[in-house]
Image (tube, grey):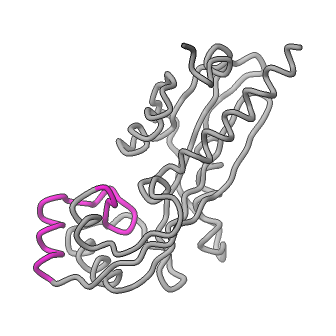
């Protein structure tokens, strides 16, 4: 039985432009072959005054655009960026355990917005979008925050937490929107976009 994305697989070499183990896991759920390539890093500098909700889409386009793709290239690059927005402020990755504890203290008992921007780029097309989910935390004690930060060291995660880890089970009260989007890759919407590209490939060959 062939993969529903088999024509896409036959046409493109799929590259995930991210070193995130969560994104590797999520893209792997689609049962498509891909390789990870983080060799074309960019300075993630956001224009002054850019609205927080536009930041991840902008950064995903920046990351995808860093890959050299010639006219006859078979590369299909997938790039993504995730941010946590609380009270209009972007919470990025914490630089220290102390900063992670402070972020989690701010998130406790509040609803935040998690936005993931995704860009798919080939030699002849580029598609970009952002997906949003609302995440509501319950109360967190200092003991619980210390336990999570000390055991899971969430310094590589926007907002200082991973929804798939202990804190997701113990502290997240509600999620409105895609769970996988909060993990870092809205795979349902990505799958739909890849299906659309596959249809375009099929139509071009007919």
Q: Which residues are magenta?
A: 142-164
Position of 205 with respect to 101 (left or right) is right
Residue appearing at x 53%, y 45% in the figure: 187
Residue at (78, 28) in percent of width and height? 199
Numbered label tally: 0
Residue 83 in the image: above or below residue 197: below
105 lies above or below 191: below
Q: Is residue 182 left or right of residue 145?
A: right
In the image, is 161 to the left or to the right of 71? left
Task: Name the image quarter holding the C terminus.
Answer: top right
Type of secondary structure dominating the magenta stretch: helix
Quarter of the view holding residue 50: bottom right
Residue beneath the point at 18% across and 66% down: 149
Is 147 one of the magenta-colored residues? yes
Residue 75 drawn at (x, y percent): 64, 23
The residue sitting at 40% across, 77% down in the picture is 136
């Amino acid at each position: 039985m062939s993969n529903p994305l088999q024509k896409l697989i036959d046409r493109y070499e799929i590259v995930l432009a991210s070193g995130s183990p969560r994104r590797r896991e999520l893209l792997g759920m689609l049962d498509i072959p891909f390789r990870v390539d983080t060799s074309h890093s960019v300075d993630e500098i956001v224009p002054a005054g850019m609205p927080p909700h536009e930041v991840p889409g902008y950064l995903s386009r920046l990351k995808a655009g860093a890959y050299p793709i010639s006219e006859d290239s078979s590369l299909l690059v997938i790039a993504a960026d995730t941010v946590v927005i609380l009270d209009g402020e972007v919470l990025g990755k914490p630089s220290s355990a102390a900063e992670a504890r402070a972020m989690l203290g701010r998130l406790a008992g509040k609803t935040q917005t998690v936005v993931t921007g995704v860009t798919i780029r080939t030699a002849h097309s580029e598609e970009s979008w952002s997906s949003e989910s609302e995440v509501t935390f319950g109360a967190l004690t200092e003991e619980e925050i210390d336990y999570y930060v000390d055991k899971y060291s969430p310094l590589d995660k926007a907002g200082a937490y991973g929804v798939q880890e202990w804190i997701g089970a113990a502290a997240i009260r509600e999620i409105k929107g895609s769970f996988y989007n909060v993990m870092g890759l809205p795979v349902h919407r990505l799958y739909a976009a890849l299906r659309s590209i596959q249809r375009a490939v099929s139509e071009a060959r007919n």
